Image: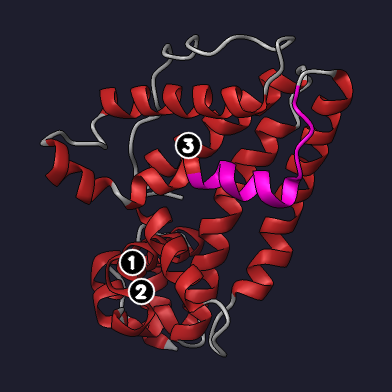
């Protein structure tokens, strides 16, 4: 306990900051190495704390990974639900959602790597996807389904089945980041450069608009303006 108290006072002086430092270091380590490859030694070294402090906050590596998933998915869920709660007509609210989802992934590089890894683990005994889906994905899916229904009833959207349209829309937003290394080889350009991300975000909005909007909604090709948030590790 003495070593824990010493570290708690020595890591920026405040326990909540020590815990946050450990959690952010864990996000980076799990994103790089995966669950099996992540090492607590690397996490405490990156966070600037000792291992006793890590185990003070998180009883074991599995508990730490659970906290990482909550950090990752609560962040994107908060951004998305904030966009969907705006008092806007359905077309503008949908565009706000696309921007919020895309911008969050662009600003948080570890996010899509952890998400992809957890999707691959889904269905295995060790997967947390069931809990994550219930806690974070279900509310977002319900909000998007309600928006699609509202837009169809107002005449702004085509009538679509959310069971098919929502995952298609999310794939258009997110899969670009998964394929970025391949696209860099194929094109010679950095797909994650700020100007490319602005172009891609506009293209995503145009693509979804063309698939969903009726003639009542705004025409595509009007979404190039606007900068993305600065890239950062903190979720």
**Numbered disc 3: secondary structure:** helix
Image mark for residue 102: 3
Is residue 27 rendered to the left or right of residue 29? Answer: right
Are the residues at dot 2 and dot 1 in contact (C-beta closer than 8 Å)? yes
Q: Which of labels 3 and 2 is toward the front?
A: 3
Magenta: main secondary structure equals helix
Horizontal and vertical percent position of residue 187 = 15, 36
- The residue singled out by tag 1 in the image is 10
| Residue sitting at x 34%, y 52% | 178
**Foreground pick, 14 / 115:** 115
In the image, the segment drawn in magenta is: 157-171
92 and 103: which one is in front?
Answer: 92
Disc 2 on helix, strand or loop? helix
> Could you tell me which secondary element the residue under label 1 belongs to?
helix
The answer to which of 30 and 206 lies nearer the viewer is 206
Q: Where is residue 181 in the image (x, y as percent from the top left)?
A: 21, 50
Q: Name the residue under label 2.
A: 7
Query: Which image quarter is the N terminus in?
Result: bottom left
Q: In this view, does 208 lie above or below 177?
A: above
């Amino acid at each position: 306990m003495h070593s824990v108290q010493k570290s708690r006072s020595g890591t920026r002086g405040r326990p909540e900051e020590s815990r946050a430092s450990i959690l952010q270091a864990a996000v980076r380590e799990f994103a790089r190495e995966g669950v099996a490859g992540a090492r607590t030694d690397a996490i405490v070294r990156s966070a600037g704390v000792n291992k006793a402090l890590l185990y003070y906050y998180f009883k074991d590596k599995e508990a730490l990974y659970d906290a990482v998933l909550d950090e990752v998915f609560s962040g994107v869920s908060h951004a998305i639900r904030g966009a969907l709660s705006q008092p806007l007509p359905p077309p503008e609210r949908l565009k706000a959602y696309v921007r919020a989802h895309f911008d969050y992934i662009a600003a948080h590089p570890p996010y899509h790597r952890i998400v992809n890894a957890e999707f691959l683990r889904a269905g295995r005994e060790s997967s947390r996807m069931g809990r994550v889906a219930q806690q974070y994905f279900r509310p977002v899916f319900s909000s998007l389904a309600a928006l699609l229904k509202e837009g169809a009833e107002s005449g702004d959207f085509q009538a679509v089945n959310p069971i098919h349209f929502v995952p298609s829309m999310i794939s258009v937003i997110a899969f670009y980041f998964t394929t970025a290394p391949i696209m860099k080889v194929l094109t010679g350009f950095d797909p994650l450069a700020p100007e490319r991300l602005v172009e891609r975000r506009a293209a995503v909005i145009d693509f979804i608009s063309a698939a969903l909007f009726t003639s009542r909604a705004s025409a595509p090709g009007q979404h190039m303006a606007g900068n993305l948030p600065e890239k950062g590790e903190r979720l």
